[in-house]
């Protein structure tokens, strides 16, 4: 009997492949499918959808390892994620950070008097706003030197500085999220998790079982994309398990951290300006560490949910939250670390982290508190499918950088929170970017279709001429159907539509050497049409150059 073949069966070419099934990938796929592209294929590296939205059961409740809040609520526009929350009846509660400044503990367990803490906080906000104004003015006037800011020195100043700058605070950060959607934040406290929104979204266009499990073959889990080959005609994707997939277009929704890493290689390589833009974007690491206790020992009540530990090392187990408001009786504390501290704890054992956290809690609440019985430390940095928590753009908008990040390369389109002009870093930014990118792909397809309508008669004509010509010369039929006119308007391998205009005369020696008598007029017509297409493509290049000043043509 024949043994079953180990070579995976070739998959049919799809119109579009979406890499990644986080919020942006799924929202992009939904738009494509609902526009009639039934054959969209989604390749996701892990065994689940959701990406940086990830619920896990811990200590008897659902905790959010990634996004936990709907940020931007109560403003003049409605956050689209809030609309989804309302539709799916997800349980949330308001997070009020304003009292955290009155719950600042020193290393001896004393709370700073509210007057001192409040004054220090207000001063830090003033300085931060002042700095921002200075920077904006400096950018406007192209002044390089800015007044040095007041540097926080004491443990309390360092703690406040950490809260103001490592968490987005509407008081100091004029982000579109706060300006448009409002300054409030709702925490998701639902056993189905934040990721329930993604399951609902996927369920809108992918088939699922009666238990809600997605069964649609268009979603392929455990498919780690390692290589993307792209030409002017399409893309070929190779996954770690040895499969290849072909498509006309590709939407890449992996995080900026993954783009910075070497997980995915591109053939040909991404152009230098794209690689530089990817390098230039900073990433933030944000780690919520969950600790489970046999009973609660921290102050509870409406204004005690958040508390701060002031240590001489900035960001050392600074920001704490108890989960009693969300899940009464859960006896869970959450402490948030960022950036270098996140990396440090990711690289040590959970037991070491538990000991450090316990020492901090003992500093604040005394030596007799119970030991944590469980700890959960998410690892976003060492996770090769994330390598960050979210992108971190400079406060002063850098349009050039953003445009370079957003710009497609040939048939590869980029999406994800890091491509969102107004809402980078957030769930709603990811969701809206997916929609925008899918629309851009549809536009591009329409443009190509229109071009083909124009080109097809020319193709037929050049085919018939080439046929008679090559018949006359060699007796063979045309080997390659790609017409020089098609090449005029096709993308080059660097991804810029029609950046190089081929010399038609060079590509058509046989036609010129001995044209059939009745083809002379037709040839003139082809030349004129090609010239007009060339002019059109030059205009495209001009537009692209003006959008992408860093582009090396
Ligand atoms: C700890 C943390 C806290 C956060 N808190 C908030 C918050 O409270 N509120 C808020 O609005 N936002 C928050 N965010 C940000 C928010 O989670 C993200 O902005 C958003 O979820 C990003 O969605 P995305 O689709 O852009 O990317 P992702 O969700 O990362 O989706 C990308 C997908 O691509 C997959 N992938 C990666 N590499 C490959 C590959 N080679 N092949 C195939 N698939 C691949 C990944 O597995 C992933 O599923 C937080 C993020 C983190 C990590």
Image (spheres, rainbow, N blue to C red):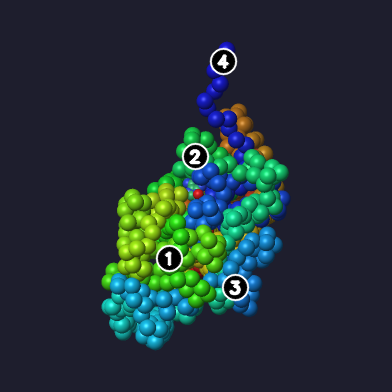
Q: Which image quarter is the C terminus in?
A: bottom left
Q: Earlier in the sequence, mark 4 or mark 3?
A: 4
Secondary structure under tag 2 reads strand
Task: Pick the residue in front: 237 or 340.
Answer: 340
Q: Earlier in the sequence, mark 4 or mark 1?
A: 4
Q: Is mark 3 within 8 Å of ligand 1?
A: no
Q: Position of residue 39 (x, y in %)?
A: 66, 44
Comparing labels 2 and 1, the label whose residue is closer to the camera? 1
Q: Earlier in the sequence, mark 2 or mark 3?
A: 3
Q: Residue at x 46, y 60 (%)?
A: 295
Q: Residue at x 58, y 37 (%)?
A: 480
Comparing labels 2 and 3, the label whose residue is closer to the camera? 3
Q: Position of residue 72 (x, y in %)?
A: 57, 72
Query: What number is the disc on residue 73?
Result: 3
The answer for how far apart the CA atoms under marks 2 and 4 are is 27 Å
Q: Earlier in the sequence, mark 3 or mark 1?
A: 3
From the image, tell me which residue sits under label 4: 2
């Amino acid at each position: 009997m024949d043994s079953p073949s180990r070579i995976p069966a070739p998959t049919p070419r799809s119109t579009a492949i979406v890499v990644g099934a986080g919020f942006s990938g799924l929202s992009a796929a939904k738009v494509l499918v609902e526009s009639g592209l039934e054959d969209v294929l989604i390749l996701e590296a892990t065994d689940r959808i959701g990406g940086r939205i990830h619920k896990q059961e811990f200590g008897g409740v659902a905790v959010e390892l990634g996004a936990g809040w709907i940020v931007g609520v109560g403003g003049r526009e409605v956050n689209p994620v809030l609309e989804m929350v309302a539709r799916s009846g997800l349980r949330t509660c308001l997070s009020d950070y304003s009292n955290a400044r009155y719950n600042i503990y020193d290393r001896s367990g004393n709370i700073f008097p509210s007057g001192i803490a409040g004054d220090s906080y207000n001063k830090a906000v003033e300085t931060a706003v002042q700095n921002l104004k200075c920077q904006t003015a400096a950018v406007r006037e192209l002044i390089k030197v800015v007044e040095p800011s007041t540097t926080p020195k004491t443990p309390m100043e360092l703690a406040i500085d950490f809260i103001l700058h490592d968490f987005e605070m509407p008081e100091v950060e004029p982000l579109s999220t706060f300006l448009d959607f409002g300054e409030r934040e709702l925490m998701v406290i639902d056993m189905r998790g934040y990721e329930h929104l993604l399951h609902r979204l996927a369920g809108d266009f992918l088939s699922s079982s009666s238990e809600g499990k997605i069964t649609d073959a268009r979603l392929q889990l455990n498919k780690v994309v390692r290589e993307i080959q792209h030409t002017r005609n399409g893309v070929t994707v190779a996954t770690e398990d040895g499969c290849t997939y072909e498509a006309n277009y590709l939407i890449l929704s992996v995080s900026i951290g993954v783009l910075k890493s070497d997980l995915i290689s591109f053939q040909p390589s991404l152009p230098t300006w794209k690689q530089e833009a990817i390098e230039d974007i900073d990433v933030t690491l944000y780690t919520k560490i969950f600790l489970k206790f046999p009973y609660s020992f921290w102050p509870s009540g409406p204004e005690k949910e958040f508390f701060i530990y002031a240590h001489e090392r900035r960001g050392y187990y600074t920001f704490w939250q108890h989960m009693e408001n969300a899940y009464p009786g859960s006896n869970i504390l959450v402490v948030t670390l960022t950036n270098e501290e996140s990396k440090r704890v990711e690289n040590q054992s959970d037991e070491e982290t538990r000991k450090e956290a316990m020492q901090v809690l003992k500093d604040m609440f005394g030596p007799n508190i119970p030991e944590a019985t469980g700890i959960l430390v998410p690892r976003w940095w060492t996770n090769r499918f994330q390598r960050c928590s979210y992108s971190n753009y400079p406060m002063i908008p850098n349009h050039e950088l953003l445009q370079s990040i957003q710009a497609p390369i040939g048939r590869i389109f980029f999406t994800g929170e890091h491509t969102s002009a107004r809402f980078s870093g957030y769930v709603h930014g990811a969701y809206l970017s997916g929609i925008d990118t899918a629309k851009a792909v549809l536009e591009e397809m329409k443009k190509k279709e229109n071009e083909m309508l124009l080109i097809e008669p020319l193709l037929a004509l050049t085919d018939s001429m080439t046929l008679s010509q090559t018949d006359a010369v060699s007796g063979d039929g045309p080997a390659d159907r790609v017409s020089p006119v098609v090449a005029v308007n096709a993308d080059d391998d660097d991804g810029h539509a029609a950046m190089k205009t081929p010399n038609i005369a060079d590509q058509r020696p046989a036609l010129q050497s001995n044209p059939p008598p009745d083809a002379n007029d037709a040839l003139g017509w082809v030349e004129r049409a090609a010239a007009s297409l060339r002019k059109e493509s030059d205009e495209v290049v001009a537009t692209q150059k003006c959008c992408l000043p860093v582009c090396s043509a």
